[in-house]
Image: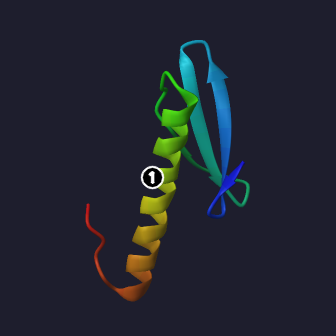
């Protein structure tokens, strides 16, 4: 699956779910292991949104909120 240009790959683990995030075939981030797929997806989407916001801020020379 894809979200805003990033590829999100769901991993089914014995203890829950994890989303691995890649872009252009390169590893970006492993999400936390969560009990539900919905929470893993939510965490991954928030990570991507923060990464895009930070890149946009860096390009415009403004610091992004933490």
Does residue 64 lie above or below 46 as drawn? below
Dot 1 crowding, Cα within 10 Å, few <14, some 14–19, many 20+: few
Where residue 4 appears, as percent x and y from the top left, is 62, 63
Looking at the image, the residue that sits furthest to the top is 14
> In percent of the image, x 65 and y 23: which residue is there?
12
Where residue 39 appears, as percent x and y from the top left, is 48, 34
Where residue 45 appears, as percent x and y from the top left, is 52, 51
In this figure, which residue is indicated by the disc labeled 1? 46
Using the image as rendered, state which of residue 44 and residue 30 is in the foreground.
Answer: 44
Horizontal placement of 37 versus 25: left or right? left
For the image, the number of numbered tags is 1
Where residue 19 appears, as percent x and y from the top left, is 59, 37
Horizontal placement of 6 versus 44: left or right? right
Viewport quadrant of the C terminus = bottom left
Does residue 16 lie above or below 26 as drawn? above
Using the image as rendered, state which of residue 3 and residue 64 is in the foreground.
Answer: 3
Callout 1: SS: helix
Horizontal placement of 56 versus 63: left or right? right
> In percent of the image, x 45 and y 52: which residue is there?
46
Say how the picture is coloured.
Answer: rainbow
Looking at the image, the residue that sits furthest to the bottom is 60
> In percent of the image, x 30 and y 71: which residue is there?
64
Using the image as rendered, state which of residue 4 and residue 54 is in the foreground.
Answer: 4
> Residue 57's quadrant in the figure?
bottom left
Does residue 66 lie above or below 18 as drawn? below
Does residue 31 lie above or below 28 as drawn? above
């Amino acid at each position: 699956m894809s979200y805003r240009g990033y590829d999100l790959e769901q991993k089914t683990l014995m203890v829950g779910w994890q989303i691995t995030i890649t872009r252009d075939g390169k590893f970006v981030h492993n999400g936390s292991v969560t009990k539900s797929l919905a929470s893993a997806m939510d965490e991954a989407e928030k990570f991507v949104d923060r990464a895009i916001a930070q890149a946009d801020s860096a390009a415009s020379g403004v610091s992004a909120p933490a």
